[in-house]
Amino acid sequence: MNLIRRILVLSSLLVAGVAGAQAPGVSEREIVVGSIQDLSGPIALLGAPVRDGMLMRFEDANAAGGVHGRKLRLVVEDAGYDPKKGVLAAKKLIQRDRAFAFLADLGTPVVMATMPLIVDAGRPHLFPFSPHESTYAPRHPLKFQLFAPYQDYMDAATRHMVQTHGYRRTCLLYQDDDYGLEVMKGVEAGLAKLRQALAEKTSYKRGATDFSSQVARLRGAGCDFVVLATVVRETVAAVAEARRTGWNVDLLVTASGYSAQTHELGGKAVEGLYGVTVLPHPYEAGANAQLADWIRRYRARFGVAPNVWSVMGYGVADLFVKAADQAGRELTVERFTAALESLHTPRDFFGAPEYRFSRDDHLGNRQGRIAQIQDGRWVILTDYLK
């Protein structure tokens, strides 16, 4: 009987221990959050400010006591915009760092390669910087997206530009991967609603620096409007090549090229470039009081001025903090995702749109805005397009 009693006691303790076990990455003192960024590759200009924005928000939360007494620890791995390196980074964050969730992974090629590993490991895949439909649809309990998908916002942006300016020959320069193909679908859908089709399209490989052949092909096709499915450096190179040859065609870049670095690197060559954005750039001149204070704190912390990618990094981290707080002290993946599904945030001092999730819809926003580079800075031209 004594032996049986001991077995029963040990069994009950084991069951209690399992039931009370914390989720991976969650201890009594901290919550570990993983992120895969580009800190050394062709879009490192985006990855570094995204990382810094997230880090600043987590530091703000930690300075205020953390989330239910737990400090937030951000572990960032550099994939260099390389899907193979991204897979290795995801495995490290899952197995060695035991990240509770993945936040703001950067780049469609990397996200497409790593997202299956992350959700198969039972980790929330949150707000990747890849507005690809598969990041939120079909609905998956662990997939949440914040950024309007390429297809939706490029459909609306293309229609707006063509209807406003009366273009007859719309063309496309696109990155030869999932990112470019998603943009193409949106552009083609928008044109189809106007009973038009792409007059010409041409692609480039990630990291390309010479766009002379692509620009010559589009110019030869008589394009009067060109959509750019490019990122910052490629945007500057393509626009500069067009202007160098005397071609002053109107160009519209996706949100992946909407950055202060675009006009800082491109100078006069990119004047007049249109872009799609969700957020205004955080320029210090004309900033409201809250934004001005945030810019000051960011500059003091990182030694550089913030840009729109810094703001987006801060914003996605803020949503994580809000959901983790709402989930309560007993933090589990199930409680966290349930909290996200009930989250609704109003417009803020950054100028962000409202974000709203539900049990049936894990996409927080579907709309973008049109901006243009005027006198060396991005100027917002429209409200959110439908």
Image (cartoon, rainbow, N blue to C red):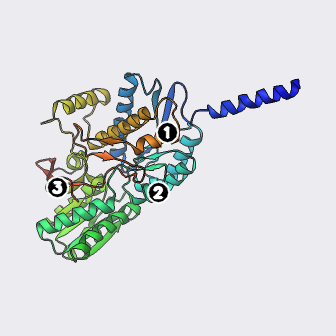
Q: Which residue is mark 1?
A: 335
Rate crowding at label 1 as few (under 14), some (14 to 19) or many (20 or more) other CA atoms within 10 Å.
Answer: some
Q: Earlier in the sequence, mark 3 or mark 2?
A: 2
Q: Which residue is mark 3?
A: 269
- Which tag is nearer the camera, tag 1 or tag 3? 1
x and y, in percent, of residue 25 in the image: 54, 35
Rate crowding at label 2 as few (under 14), some (14 to 19) or many (20 or more) other CA atoms within 10 Å.
Answer: some
- Left or right of residue 246, residue 228 in this image: right
Query: Viewer-proximal residue, 67 or 19?
Result: 19
Q: Earlier in the sequence, mark 2 or mark 1?
A: 2
Q: Secondary structure at mark 2?
A: helix
- Left or right of residue 235, residue 5 in this image: right
Count of residue discs: 3
- Toward the front, the furthest residue is 1
Q: CA distance from mark 3 to mark 2?
A: 33 Å
Disc 2 residue type (three-letter): Met
- Which tag is nearer the camera, tag 3 or tag 2? 2
Disc 1 residue type (three-letter): Arg
Indicate the quadrant where residue 231 lies: bottom left
Residue contact between numbered discs 3 and 2, judged by CB atoms under 8 Å: no
Rate crowding at label 3 as few (under 14), some (14 to 19) or many (20 or more) other CA atoms within 10 Å.
Answer: some
Disc marking residue 227: none
Answer yes or no: is residue 39 visible.
no
User: Which residue corresponds to the image point at 18% horizontal and 76% vertical from the top-left?
Assistant: 222
Q: Is residue 330 above or below residue 38?
A: above
Q: CA distance from mark 1 to mark 3?
A: 50 Å
Q: Which residue is mark 2?
A: 112
User: Which residue corresponds to the image point at 46% horizontal and 23% vertical from the top-left?
Assistant: 69
